[in-house]
Image (cartoon, helix red, strand yellow):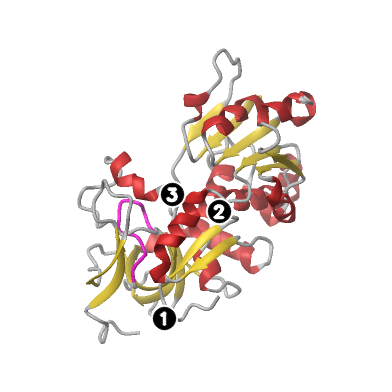
Amino acid sequence: MSTTGLPKTMKSLLQPTRESTSLILTTSPLPQLTHPDDVLIRVAAAAPCNGELLWARNFPDAIPASKELVPCQDLAGTVVSAPENSGFSAGDKVYCRIEADRPGAAREYATARVRELAKIPSSLGWVEAAATPLSALTAWQALFVQGGGLLDAKGVRGDKEVRERNGKVRVLVTGAAGGVGSWAVQFASLAGAKGVVAVCGGDKESVVKELGANEVVNYRETSIEQWVGEDLERREVDLVVDMIGGASLRGCWTAVKNGGSLVSVNTPPDMVKPEGLQKEVHSLFFIVEPLGSNLAEIGELIEAGKVRPLVDSVWEFDQFEKAFERLESGHAKGKIIIKVSDEVAV
């Protein structure tokens, strides 16, 4: 695929100002390649992230003033041009998470860096591919990189000795039916964890059990504190992966064992630690690193049929407002996807 013959302009979503939380559908020039590792991609589908329209305002040190405020850092699309010896060629179907300090993928053409990209598994369509990068990468890194070494990724590949060690670890996941949570449940189960506790609404119990959870806490009926307090010795967990923050994260302090790990992608756990609680816990908040190498490894598991993305709904490009409303409702079961290209079938 040659870069000649490309249009001079494209459709794009844009956040008009850093203070605004609304979006407009506009026309803009195609993105310029400004870095030696830039790859130009024709976008098929993109996925928004809850809260992303607040990033520029709330995290000015992380989101530079020069950033063109195009949302949706997750994409699936086709390579138009790539650096020589990058491992990617024109025509390759790829997916990735674009670093948050650069423009996103809610536009017909976008740029990503070589290190962020991976080739889409042949078993995935555009929608499922766009649903994968942020959520899968975050869950993978929360469990296997940031989780204090309690759970080893080699277990997902069947290493018997590792699975024996993983088999002593109990994991609790909040927001378990959401984008990140659904992947965390699958990865923990696949790695051989002793138990996978999913915290979600009761209407999502069957979904999380299908993904690998063997215990479910319906947060609408009981708090995490109440649940663990009913049988502390049996219900305490070694590792918590939290997506929710607030009261849910506070409750996780009760559930995690002394010496365990508490990882949140929402809020620094120490901010909601119950006063007077005497526990030594490896606790941290982290932001995902968009590594194509991790995504390629996850892609192998997808291709083998061992894990799968969970898609809530798919929206046309001009329905972006409804897509973000669904996302911000907090009731999605999996990822929200925006079709950027008409070639995307649902």
The disc at residue 188 is: none
The earlier-in-sequence mark between 1 and 2 is 1
Task: Say whether residue 317 is left or right of residue 223.
Answer: left
Determine whether 152 is above or below 334 in the image.
above
The disc at residue 91 is: 1
Residue displayed at 56% across by 32% down: 249
Q: Is residue 230 visible?
A: yes
Q: How far separated are the C-alphas under marks 1 and 2?
A: 28 Å
| Three-letter amino acid code of the residue under disc 1 | Gly
Determine whether 88 is above or below 221 in the image.
below
Within the magenta stretch, is there residue 99?
yes
- Residue wearing tag 3: 289
* Structural crowding at the residue carrying mark 3, measured as other residues with C-alpha within 10 Å and reported as few (<14), some (14–19) or many (≥20): some
Which dot, 1 or 2, sits closer to the camera? 2
| Three-letter amino acid code of the residue under disc 2 | Gly
Residue 70 x/y as whole percent: 31, 59
* Structural crowding at the residue carrying mark 1, measured as other residues with C-alpha within 10 Å and reported as few (<14), some (14–19) or many (≥20): some
Residue 288 x/y as whole percent: 45, 47
Residue displayed at 63% across by 29% down: 260
Q: Where's the C terminus, which quadrant? A: bottom right
Magenta stretch: helix, strand or loop mostly = loop
Task: Name the secondary structure under disc 1.
Answer: loop
Task: Say whether residue 275 is left or right of residue 105.
Answer: right
Within the magenta stretch, is there residue 105?
yes
Task: Say whether residue 18 is left or right of residue 248.
Answer: left
Residue 126 x/y as whole percent: 51, 72
The earlier-in-sequence mark between 3 and 1 is 1
Q: Nearer the viewer, residue 201 or 33?
A: 201
Magenta highlight range: 98-107
- Residue wearing tag 2: 179
Q: Is residue 87 visible?
A: no
| Three-letter amino acid code of the residue under disc 3 | Glu
